[in-house]
Amino acid sequence: MAKKLPKVDVVTIGVGWTGGIIAAELAKKGLKVVGLERGKDRSTKDFLMVHDEYRYAIRYELMQDTSRETVTFRNEAKERALPMRQLGSFLLGEGLGGSGVHWNGHNFRFLPYDFEIKTMTEKKYGKNKLGADYLIQDWGITYDELEPYFDTFEKMAGISGEDNPLGGKRSNPYPTPPMKETVITKRFKDAAKKMGLHPYHLPSANLSKSYKNPDGEQLNACQYCGFCERFGCEYGAKTSPNVTVIPTAQKTGNFELRTHSNVTRILHDGKKATGVLYVDVLTGEEFEQPADMVAVTSYVMNNNKLLLTSKLGKPYDPKSGTGIIGKNYCYQILPGAAGFFEKERFNTFMGAGALGATVDDYNGDNFDHSDLDFIHGGSLSITQTGIRPIQNNPVPPDTPRWGKDFKDKSIHYFNRVLNIGAQGASMPHRQNYLDLDPTYKDAYGEPLLRLTYDFTEQDKNLYKFIADKSAEIMKEMGADTVVTNKAAEKYNIVPYQTTHNTGGVIMGADPNTSAVNNYMQMWDAENVFVIGASAFPHNGGYNPTGTLGALAYRAAEGMAKYSKQGGSLV
Amino acid sequence: MADEEQKSTMTRRRFIRNSSLIAGGAAIGGGLLGTLIGMNLDEEERTSPNKLTGHNQSGNGQASNRALMYFTDKENFQVLSAAAERIFPEDDNGPGAIGLGVPYFIDHQLAGNYGNNTREYMQGPFPEGTPTQGYQSPLKRHQIFDEGIRMLKEISQKNHQKKFDELTGEEQDKILTQFDTGKVKMRGVDSTTFFNLLRSAVLEGAYADPLYGGNNNMDGWKMKNFPGHQGSYLSQIEAKEFKEIQPQSLHAFFK
Ligand SMILES: Cc1cc2nc3c(=O)[nH]c(=O)nc-3n(C[C@H](O)[C@H](O)[C@H](O)COP(=O)(O)OP(=O)(O)OC[C@H]3O[C@@H](n4cnc5c(N)ncnc54)[C@H](O)[C@@H]3O)c2cc1C
Ligand code: SF4
């Protein structure tokens, strides 16, 4: 029997970026918030000796322990899904701050086009541009409506950046100036300008200077230490929940954090949630935490899983096309090109997770798709994130994978290769979805989430187009050899690609085609708010956190309103 | 070289003086700053490894853990060493896997979390999957290495009537290629999986911080001009020219 605890106003399932934002905003307003986080506590002082590629980047010290929980995967519904036995294609977060601890800090706003993608695409290209199997839909909110929340997130995070000439309108400049210009970013920008493109410095959560955010949290200046993506920041210079929203919540006295607390159920009476059930991971004890509102902030995968195991919302059925939960799972398409420079060596080992330069000329609908066999596109960036020697062994094509030649070339080219890469948009397809696995279980006896996913024709066409554009820029940059990346025939869960999973609990204006409204409030359970990239009806041509952060601030506003008035917020 | 060393030390000292961490009086634990300042930043740790075994004679703490934690039969360790050296051979760039201590790195890893798959999902069933679903073997990594080494020995006995580590490099490469291309029949796992594990482990041992027992004398890093753990590149990130910086390992925190 679970031990029943005293009721609180709000419980968050997970304390990463979204859970942290909800905790801070509602605790500031005087609501009592409990944050349940399955992993352990951690803060800047735990990262003093973090410059250890093997421990953090290869053995995934800061990420999900897949011996306890993972997902199963198959390319298509007729196959048998099997467990992802170790982390691969994406690196799920675990522990205080979630993936917000070891993210890079690329901080973008999705384009105005993204939020009204269906309307705008049909208006310009007609109803059949993609075909009926692609389930694109408007988000139920416009860029202009979301703009103030983007602004709030960026000010909280102290984002360093400059205007994107092809992006949505901004009400304010970035809170801190862009990061430093390097030989590499300048080379990219010069080439892009020469080609008539519109480069700008990548908006970054590795701060260009020290900054105090509106909540009074102090962020420090980035040292370009080169151990950023997959690592925590020992300087408190990479904005994470742990140095911003979590301490903000704690200072109010209204936030109680419980680590080692794994939520297994959202409890409900068919209409509303009554609280959550969780297990103390260290003792195995089970607790019931009653709450007036439940914030589901456990990242895309577990947001979907918890709704499905708790029987909240109608599960998506790909055969009939009915139901919602698990629908519109999307990923990110990652075309790019590598440039080999024979006569130059670059300081590629220095860098920061979000140091780079970007062009958006081939993103969204910034270019004409009339004669193209895909919609949308992607942001194209050069980044200088700090290369490390285990993971980076660049060799020209046709070099053997091991032995004398491999060793010689991988050493020779270590500092002689630059990459241009895109964050390509990913469109939802009827056959790509999430549900529960019938066989495999997690450490608590709950079914694993099952992922059914493969790349589509749209993906492959987008890939080819954008990869060619990357190669053109790389040529202009003067590389001696340019290698254009090729799209994979099938999605493969083994090699790392990106932790930009989206969808499954999608937002919209219509309860028949969405799970949550534009406050992230569930249509089927008005006191349940499901927050994160799980709400994205498709994935845009950027990293997701700037946009999901804005949606989290929007959700916090909705929850504050709901605590006073109840009922549907729209 | 000495010049470069002094310059990089200077810049780091200057960093500490000028850093916003101090200037801004920022809220950062005294522990971090204390350690950064107290660190001996420019000392290069020299040991002279016995080329053949990677054995560290000096016992100065840098790479003193030269004994076996996992392997019980020394012959198996020698087979592993020979295979690792073919994957990452000694050449004009510098030492190979053996000179870098990679076999010890692998031995130590097999004895711990890595070898025992403690952070991997190991629940059955284990039906055969598609390549895009990743490995589905019930074997733990240390068992895969055991089986792989057993087969390396068996094949060299069968084809050459010799121990694997007594074969010529070319003969060894031929056998390793059979593993790489999945042609060797293994129990519970395909031979490509074993070979990929071995290949990754060799690169990891060559380039991981020396604290793990490989990358002896930071020679893996030196070959790649990788400076290892450095406090800050703030004052160098805008440099137009390529920087050669004396590498430093995490041992710097414990001197
Ligand atoms: C290596 C890497 C680099 C990245 N770089 C970027 C980038 O540059 N730009 C960008 O925009 N995005 C980036 N991301 C993605 C970014 O980190 C996520 O978008 C962001 O953290 C999502 O916030 P979230 O709150 O949804 O999830 P998280 O921040 O991951 O938080 C979820 C939390 O919920 C907890 N949890 C899960 N299930 C349960 C349960 N059952 N009970 C209790 N707790 C639970 C988890 O332990 C975790 O702490 C990166 C991700 C990775 C892994
Ligand atoms: S690169 Fe900058 S933000 Fe990233 S970990 Fe290093 S100091 Fe922190």
Image (tube, coloured by chain):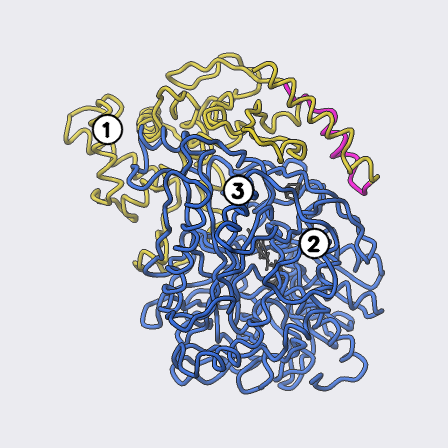
Q: Is residue A271 above or below residue A380?
A: below
Find residue A388 and report its horizontal and vertical position in percent: 51, 37
Report whether mark 3 lies on the same chain as mark 2: yes
Camera sees residue A398: yes
Chain B tint in image:
yellow
Mark 3 and mark 1: span between their CA atoms? 45 Å
Is A491 one of the magenta-colored residues?
Answer: no
* Amino acid at the residue labelled 3: Arg
Q: Tell me if mark 1 has few (under 14), some (14-19) or many (20+) residues whose alpha carbon lies within 10 angstroms of its own.
A: some
3 or 2: tag closer to the N-terminus:
2
Q: Which residue occupies the foreground of this view, A180 or B143? A: A180
Q: What quarter of the picture does the C terminus of chain A occupy? A: bottom right
The chain under label 1 reads B
Residue, disc 3: A187
| Magenta range | B26-42
| Residue that appears at 34% across and 39% down | A396
Give residue A159's mark.
2
Q: Which residue occupies the foreground of this view, B12 or A343? A: A343
Report whether mark 1 lies on the same chain as mark 2: no
Ligand 1 occupies quarter:
bottom right
How many discs appear?
A: 3
Find residue A424 and report its horizontal and vertical position in percent: 47, 61
Chain A tint in image:
blue
A49 on left or right of B76: right
B54 on left or right of B127: right
Give residue B22's mark.
none
